[in-house]
Amino acid sequence: MTRPGGTWQNWGRSESIKPLRVEYPRSVAAVQRAVDAARSVGLPVKAVGAGHSFTAIAAAPGALLDLSDLSGVVRVERDRGRVSFAAGTRLHQVPRLLAPYGLAMQNLGDIDRQTIAGALSTGTHGTGAQFGGLATQVVGVRLVTADGELLTIDDEQNADLLPAVALSLGALGVLVEVTLQCVPSFLLHADERREPLDDVLATLDARVEADHFEFYWFPHTDVALTKTNTRLPESAVRAPLPRVGKWVDETLLANGVYRATCALGSVIPAFTPPISRLAVKLTGSREYTDRSPRVFTQRRTVRFREMEYALPADAVGEAFASLRRLIAQKRWRISFPAEVRFAAADDRWLSTAHGRASAYIAVHRYFREDPAEYFTAVEQIMLSHGGRPHWGKMHSLDAAELRTRYERFDDFVALRDRLDPGRVFGNAYLTRVLGV
């Protein structure tokens, strides 16, 4: 978000920058004019969404384009289940916009504050071994290129570019419209449990066969908090969480009390292990059935920094064991849980799941704590298991290292050279991860 005085900062407070120019285009034509104007005076251009990336991928030293006003449904192809959205539409707005058509997104991550364009461009994903990341739902885009032209990419025009542009890091142009392949609305039955961590790890292969499975582990405990979601038709009976109970669990405990305990742990680290053990004891098992967006997503207000790596799915057990040993050996006091999720292989060139079934391990630190030592050590574990870093989360890799981890990396760079030879859409982060 952009603060008074013109300083932009991301949600995790890990990045900030003061752009030379800030614009709020309300139309595709306004985006084109803004790109033309910035290019004419040699200013780089970056479109920003909700600022939920922890890296500097959206940092705009020149012209910042805030797409908040470029929002809503553009058109609906009811017979094909396809819906086109303006790029600044927030994910939490999508369920309401799709409801009149009886449609839903096939899968979602656990946060819905991002814009569609931002979530896609950074490789946002949910969990489910049979489901790809959000970019796999994209069947068309409209992109303002470096010369101010509007490029349409779908299954009829420039179809060969879709695997690159659906997850583009903001490096190829400004996404102004995104077409998603939606599915009929559905419910999810959620089964959330507190279970022995070793039991979960021993049965992981079977658990991953569920529609959507993930688990959290609070360091300094031997407990996993598991979440198994089963897809049901919309005609199934809803049994949502009671409103008061949901507020207690997800607002009072998960955000309010947790914020206070994280703050305390950052000042007095010795309190962190007992607080973590108390947290898992207070987290009870529960089952409920509700509309898919209400089950997939959570509201998180406790600020943190995050690093996440995608691994070959069969490497997750060994990598996770190494993570546990690392924290024990270093005697670190880590208040935030590690999270494990899964995704199907896909064909998006820069997708962390490109060409392989993947498991994700994410680690976090409270935003007032320095994550460097922890993240650096965890990163080495992930790299040793063939890991690929989430583009919107903290990591240290550069183009030389990333090139070895993506077979279509050079193809993407060549497309960037073609669409943006002057690096109108460049910034320091893109220079680091893609090269000059």
Image (spheres, grey):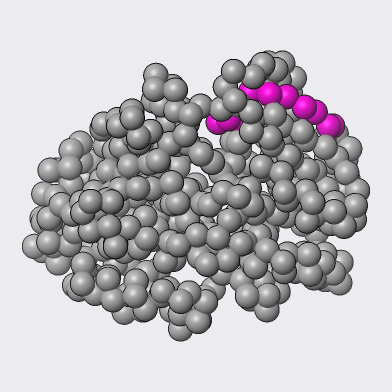
Q: Is any atom of residue 391 visible in this view? A: no
Q: Residue at x 72, y 69 (%)?
A: 315
Q: Position of residue 385 (x, y in %)?
A: 68, 75
Q: Position of residue 284 (x, y in %)?
A: 84, 32
Q: Nearer the viewer, residue 194 or 2?
A: 194
Q: Is any atom of residue 145 visible in this view? A: yes
> Which of the 4 image quarters holds residue 186?
top right
For residue 194: magenta? no
In the visual, does 32 lie left or right of 383? left
* Highlighted magenta segment, given as a residue range: 284-295
Q: Nearer the viewer, residue 272 or 131?
A: 131
For residue 290: magenta? yes
Quarter that holds the N terminus: top left
Residue ranking furthest to the front: 79
Q: Position of residue 46 (x, y in %)?
A: 29, 56
Quarter that holds the C terminus: bottom left
In the visual, does 250 lie left or right of 163? right
Q: Residue at x 68, y 24 (%)?
A: 289
In this rendering, is residue 200 above or below 231? below
Q: Residue at x 82, y 37 (%)?
A: 193
In the visual, does 143 lie left or right of 93? left
Q: Residue at x 77, y 33 (%)?
A: 191
In this rendering, is residue 335 above or below 321? above
